[in-house]
Amino acid sequence: MELPPLLHEWFQWELLRDNWCTRLHQNRDDLEDAIQKVARMLIESRYAVAFTGAGMSVESGIPDFRGPQGLWKTYNPEVATLSFFSKNPEQFWKFAREIGDKLLKAKPNPAHKALAKLEKMGYIKAVITQNIDGLHQKAGSVNVIEIHGNIEKFICMFCKVVYDIEYVRKKLKNDAFPYCELCGGPLKPMATFFEEKPPEDAIERAAEEAKKCDLMLILGSSLVVEPAAQIPRIAKRNGAKLVIINMEPTWFDNACDIVIHERVGLVLPKVVKYVIRMTKKSRLSKLLDFFS
Ligand code: NAD
């Protein structure tokens, strides 16, 4: 799933170019102005969807991969490849034990809750997520497409029998890694690993949403993992407006209509606040028009 090195270099050039044609907020007023624009775009949209990445859950205490405190600062990314898992299930499960606890204990943060609220208010129609932590659903989002699976189920690498998390928990109490009770094969989380194809039906549904939308909010993703990163590109090709909210610049910033380099946990609740304020205001002015 990672980009080949040459493509990666090309994207780095894009990123540099992006920094020259900066359209970022320079101060608090600009940030507030950009947030209000996002709220207005949501109100005016016909079909808005969100595309989320690991940055969405950092404020829930789950580290991302490539951010400043990302997992790849401590671990070798090889640990999340299918080939590594096939050869060293025991070592993979050592890594999984360390981060698994954080994943399972995490709670939705203000960004997840704001997104769920926007769906409830009718402004967000779907959430396409690369995350495997289930926090969007826990926050109340309903139409969630998990393009990299999740950590609720585990599959035997040999006979493909599927187990739930309770079975795995029990096994991990006594064994170095969980294995299949039928054939003894190692169990792998049903989350997409590097070198592995993501679930086709989820990718197809996500691509459909990207074609259908006229606005996409891209939230907390470096957009370097393929084919997931195709989803915003599909939306762009089909004429959707794009908003990106990410702590750091991405190679895709230049393709977006609004770029905000801030925490999603700070920005999204403000978007909700402005959507409520703006829609209240317009209801009030309609009422005044009616009586005048
Ligand atoms: P990534 O690690 O490549 O990029 C995350 C981005 O989020 C970074 O650019 C970082 O600057 C930004 N970020 C960090 N904190 C943020 C915040 N509070 N607000 C806004 N932006 C913030 O993640 P990715 O693009 O999603 O791709 C990595 C892959 O890792 C995905 O496939 C995903 O499945 C997997 N992953 C998932 C989880 C999870 O489920 N929570 C955690 C780690 C990795």
Image (spheres, rainbow, N blue to C red):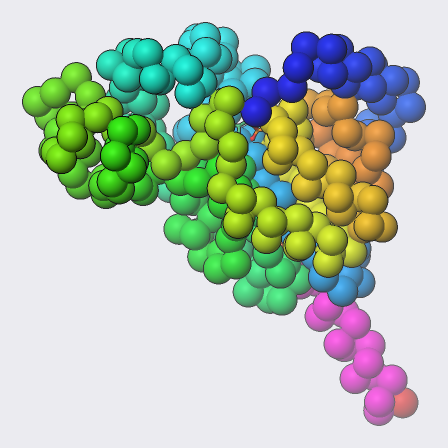
**Residue 39 picture quarter:** bottom right
Instruction: Tell which of 285 and 105 is nearer to you.
Output: 105
Residue 74 in percent (x, y) is at 44, 8
Q: Is residue 99 left or right of residue 272?
A: left
* Ligand number 1: quarter of image: top right
Instruction: Tell which of 224 and 159 is nearer to you.
Output: 159
Q: Is residue 32 left or right of residue 226?
A: right
**Residue 22 picture quarter:** top right
Residue at screen point 68% across, 41% down? 231
The N terminus lies in quadrant: top right
Instruction: Tell which of 119 and 84 is nearer to you.
Output: 84
Residue at screen point 84% across, 41% down? 257
**Residue 149 visible in the shown view:** yes
Residue at screen point 83% across, 44% down? 237
Magenta span: 275-291
Question: Most prominent secondary structure in the magenta stretch?
Answer: helix
Vertical position of residue 207 compared to residue 263: above or below: below
Residue 86 in percent (x, y) is at 34, 17
**Residue 119 picture quarter:** bottom right
**Magenta includes 180?**
no
Q: Is residue 126 left or right of residue 185?
A: right
Residue 95 in percent (x, y) is at 32, 16
Residue 276 in percent (x, y) is at 66, 63
Residue at screen point 65% across, 24% down? 224
**Magenta includes 280?**
yes
